[in-house]
Image (cartoon, rainbow, N blue to C red):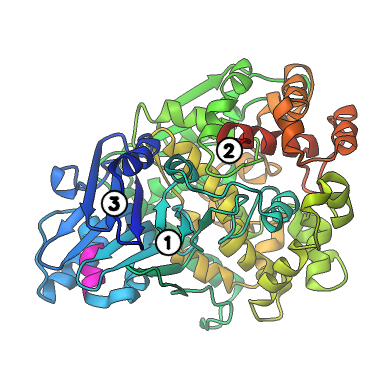
């Protein structure tokens, strides 16, 4: 895992060294082990390295292959790189390093723009082809690794974070009204390629982009999730057995492909507990587990240690348990927000940030349970959608959209008003997937579009802020392709995630399996009162907020008058949504620009 950036000029000028250094400086936390730059004519590339595979200097980047005339910057991990390496070696390629980075270079040399289809892993990379004078960029199938870019008549810049591009300057930071509508309808998700800022875009998952030296660019899809993929007729038990085998392979692959120890973020929920159990199943050796909790509030316990301790004891893991004082949540919220490439309203972002700090002192890589709910239908709103009547978008929107378009018009300043941008975008996304199984279409849209920005982005940003790589086996390509074609009725049994519960039955205590679905508890933010309420009030009544003029003041006041009583259909706090966005803008965007 690393941080990457670069600039390609279209005007014949050479990129400025200070510009590239400004970008790489903003990426330092993603890659604390090494840094590098590459300059050649109208191109510059920058890299910050987190050493996980082939710890030697031979795998430092930018990686230059003089023989092939290629230069690479890469963020991610290629899980099938040993097999690819042997296959490419058989084709006559010679390797000077032992890591996965060089395999990408050789794969591009062999397969050209088709190379991402051969890569099984999580990745965002850019390759400069010196002979053809073109820049090739690609992002993994589920967008687990970020890749932002900005285009201007004079050139293109790209980076792992929006902050790196903002540090380079020349970015239009005015608000994109379409993205703003998505942000407040889809709990801070803005589907690629848009971001909240007009001048920043992000490469879509499962897409590549080719940019020529004179500024022509072409974006193409290299993979899509296929719900019509044919599998042999299987009983429910056979589907679950196939899933078990695919998951075993996924967790083992993510343990084995590393030259450093790999830990597990153990919340005590079904998903992370099952990762521990399956790693033990495949002989994971000494298991390192990590849990975080907060101080209790009168209404809610601030940790789930009773469950994580149970799993750690059952599998004799080397367990690390961290308790964070509630006062640190607000004290350090600004730090977490500064490491959000885009605003995130999931309140557990601060929990992941503070957990990442502690875990990074022990290991560089962890496995995490993100994606299980979206792949296996674990959230409460999926059965609600199934039971609803109407069109796909009516059933979806009623139980998922944070607010109606009418409420949006009451909330946002008239200068940003426009049509309902989100409903047609989601309707198009749902219709993209064929078949008669409505819930499977919803899950496919979720896992290929929405999950990218929540929770995948949240985990990447908050862990990589500490140079900690998070691997997500439930989003393994083979797992997702298999489970996407499983009849939804199987996934929805047992209150959701039925296949995982069946797999876990012989591996985990029933109390862990059968407990109600839990969410990372952050009581200091969940209950809006005291210092938390005052923080939100200060942000929303600040001079900067008034000058920005994004929100209608009577709507803000209505939220402040009832801070703990205005929630979205999926239980998000509407006041927090306003305050977090404004706070992110204050931390990242100069209002005078």
Q: Residues within 10 Å of mark 3 (few under 14, many from 20)?
A: many
Residue 45 badge: 3
Q: Nearer the viewer, residue 24 or 226?
A: 24
Check residue 401 in the rendering and tell me which mark sits there, or answer none.
none
Residue located 73% across and 71% down the image: 427
Q: Picture coordinates of residue 281 (x, y %)?
A: 39, 50
Q: Earlier in the sequence, mark 2 or mark 3?
A: 3
Residue 272 % position (x, y): 52, 43
Report the span colored magenta. Answer: 104-109
Q: Does 448 appear in magenta?
A: no
**Which is nearer the eye, 413 or 46?**
413
Location of residue 301 in the rendering, given as x and y in whole percent from the top left corner: 69, 25
Asked if residue 377 lies left or right of residue 50, the reply is right
- Residue 64 left/right relative to 586: left
- Residue pointed to by mark 1: 139
Q: Position of residue 359 (x, y in %)?
A: 41, 30
Q: Is residue 555 visible?
A: yes
What residue lies at 79% left-to-right and 50% top-to-bottom? 415
The answer to whether the residues at label 2 and label 3 have Cβ atoms under 8 Å apart is: no
Q: Main secondary structure of the magenta part?
A: helix
SS label for mark 3: strand
Q: Secondary structure at mark 2?
A: loop
Res 241 seen here:
no
**Distance between the Cα atoms at labels 2 and 3?**
25 Å
Whole-angstrom CA distance, mark 1 to mark 3, is 17 Å
Q: Nearer the viewer, residue 139 or 236?
A: 139
């Amino acid at each position: 895992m690393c941080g990457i950036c670069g600039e390609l000029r279209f005007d014949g000028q050479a990129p400025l060294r200070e510009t590239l250094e400004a970008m790489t400086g903003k990426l330092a936390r993603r890659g604390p082990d090494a840094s590098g730059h590459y300059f050649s004519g109208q191109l510059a590339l920058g890299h910050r390295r987190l050493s996980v595979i082939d710890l030697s200097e031979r795998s430092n980047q930018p990686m230059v292959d003089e023989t092939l005339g290629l230069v690479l910057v890469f963020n991610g991990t290629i899980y099938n790189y040993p097999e690819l390496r042997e296959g490419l070696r058989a084709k006559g390629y010679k390797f000077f390093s032992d890591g996965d980075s060089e395999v990408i270079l050789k794969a591009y040399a062999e397969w050209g723009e088709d190379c991402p289809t051969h890569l099984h892993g999580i990745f965002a990379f850019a390759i400069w082809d010196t002979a053809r004078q073109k820049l090739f960029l690609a992002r993994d199938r589920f967008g687990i690794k970020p890749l932002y870019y900005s285009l201007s008549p004079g050139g293109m810049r790209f980076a792992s974070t929006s902050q790196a591009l903002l540090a380079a300057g020349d970015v239009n930071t005015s608000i994109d009204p379409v993205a703003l509508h998505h942000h407040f309808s889809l709990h801070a998700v803005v589907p690629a390629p848009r971001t909240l800022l007009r001048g920043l875009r992000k490469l879509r998952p499962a897409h590549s982009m080719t940019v020529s030296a004179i500024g022509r660019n072409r974006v193409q899809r290299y993979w899509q999730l296929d719900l019509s993929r044919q599998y042999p007729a299987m009983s429910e038990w056979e589907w679950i057995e196939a899933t078990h085998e695919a998951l075993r392979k996924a967790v083992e692959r993510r343990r084995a492909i590393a030259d450093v120890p790999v830990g597990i973020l153990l919340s005590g929920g079904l998903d992370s507990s099952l990762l521990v159990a399956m790693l033990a199943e495949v002989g994971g050796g000494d298991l390192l587990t990590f849990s975080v909790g907060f101080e209790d509030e009168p209404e809610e316990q601030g940790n789930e240690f009773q469950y994580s301790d149970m799993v750690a004891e059952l599998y004799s893991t080397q367990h690390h348990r961290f308790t964070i004082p509630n006062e640190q949540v607000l004290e350090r919220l600004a730090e977490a927000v500064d490491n959000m490439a885009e605003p995130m309203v999931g309140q557990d972002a601060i929990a992941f940030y503070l957990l990442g700090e502690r875990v990074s002192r022990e290991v560089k890589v962890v496995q995490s349970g993100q994606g299980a709910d979206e792949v296996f239908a674990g959230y409460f709103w999926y059965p609600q959608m199934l039971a609803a009547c109407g069109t796909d978008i009516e059933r979806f929107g009623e139980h998922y959209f944070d607010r109606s378009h009418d409420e949006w018009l009451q909330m946002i300043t008239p200068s940003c008003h426009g049509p309902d941008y989100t409903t047609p975008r989601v309707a198009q996304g749902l219709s993209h997937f064929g078949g008669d199984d409505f819930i499977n279409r919803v899950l496919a849209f979720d896992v290929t579009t929405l999950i990218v920005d929540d929770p995948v982005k949240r985990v990447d940003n908050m862990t990589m802020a500490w140079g900690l790589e998070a691997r997500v086996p439930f989003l393994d390509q083979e797992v997702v392709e298999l489970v996407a074609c499983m009849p939804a009725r199987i996934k929805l049994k047992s209150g959701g995630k039925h296949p995982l519960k069946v797999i876990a039955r012989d591996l985990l205590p029933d109390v862990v399996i059968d407990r109600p679905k839990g969410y990372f508890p952050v009581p200091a933010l969940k209950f809006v009162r005291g210092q938390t309420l005052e923080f939100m009030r200060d942000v929303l009544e600040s001079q900067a907020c008034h000058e920005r003029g994004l929100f209608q003041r009577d709507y803000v006041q209505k939220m402040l008058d009832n801070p703990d009583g205005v929630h979205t259909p999926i239980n998000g706090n509407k006041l927090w949504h306003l305050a977090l966005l404004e706070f992110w803008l204050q931390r990242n965007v100069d209002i005078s620009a």
